[in-house]
Amino acid sequence: MKRTLRQLIRLSRQHLDEKRREQAEIFARIDQTQAQSEALSQQMADEAVVAQADTMARMAYPGFARAAMDRRAALAEQIAALEREAEAKAEEIRQVFEEAKRYEIMLDRQEEEAKRAADKAEQADLDEIGLTRHDPAAGPLAPEP
């Protein structure tokens, strides 16, 4: 049973590591999407400066700004979806962690029970030795060799 629990613990830990890697990938995608949104905001600011200086650019800027705002809104929705996915992954991680912890607790209890049984058996052996060496019916104690 201990061997099975050890295998379950090992598998649970591997599963936990896999879920954590998946969550890290989600966070990386969030960071990447936020960087894209920030770059788009910077590009909008740069284009606004150009539009103020150039008449042709000023005429084209409103179309660019609408498209950029739509793209930024799409990126914000994508970030929100990724954050929900990260939260769901965190819940999965919590569940897998609890499962692994249950297995570890079960193993600890089994090991503690086995230790108590071994200690009890050892004490019984020591008591038996003590009784046979000091048995009044056996006569006076003989010197130990």
Image (spheres, helix red, strand yellow):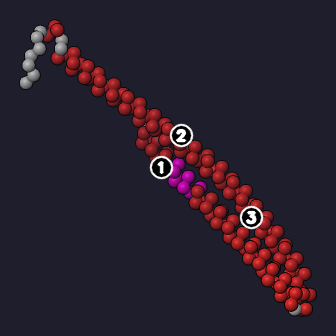
Residue kind at label 3, given as amino acid type = Ile
Q: Nearer the viewer, residue 16 or 54?
A: 54
Residue drawn at x 17%, y 8% as measured from the top left: 136
Asked if 43 appears above or below 17 in the picture, the reply is: below
Instruction: Magenta stretch: give its range.
Output: 11-19
Comparing labels 2 and 1, the label whose residue is closer to the camera: 2
Label 3: few (<14), some or many (≥20) within 10 Å?
many
In the picture, measured across the screen, residue 98 lies left or right of residue 7, that is right
The residue pinned by badge 2 equals 102
Q: The C terminus is located in which quarter? A: top left
> Upstream in the sequence, badge 2 or badge 1?
1
In the picture, measured across the screen, residue 1 lies left or right of residue 56, that is left
Question: Where residue 104 sits: x, y (%)?
Answer: 49, 41
Residue kind at label 1, given as amino acid type = Arg
The answer to which quarter of the image holds residue 19 is: bottom right
The residue pinned by badge 1 equals 10
Residue drawn at x 91%, y 92% as measured from the top left: 55
> Upstream in the sequence, badge 1 or badge 3?
1
Tell me which secondary structure the magenta stretch mostly adopts: helix
Q: Secondary structure at mark 2?
A: helix
Asked if 22 appears above or below 54 in the picture, the reply is: above
Q: Nearer the viewer, residue 11 or 104?
A: 104
Q: Any magenta on residue 118?
A: no
Question: Where residue 3 sits: x, y (%)?
Answer: 42, 42
Q: CA distance from mark 2 to mark 1?
A: 13 Å
The residue pinned by badge 3 equals 79
Question: Where residue 51 sits: x, y (%)?
Answer: 86, 87
Q: Any magenta on residue 16?
A: yes
Q: The N terminus is located in which quarter? A: top left
Which mark identifies residue 20?
A: none
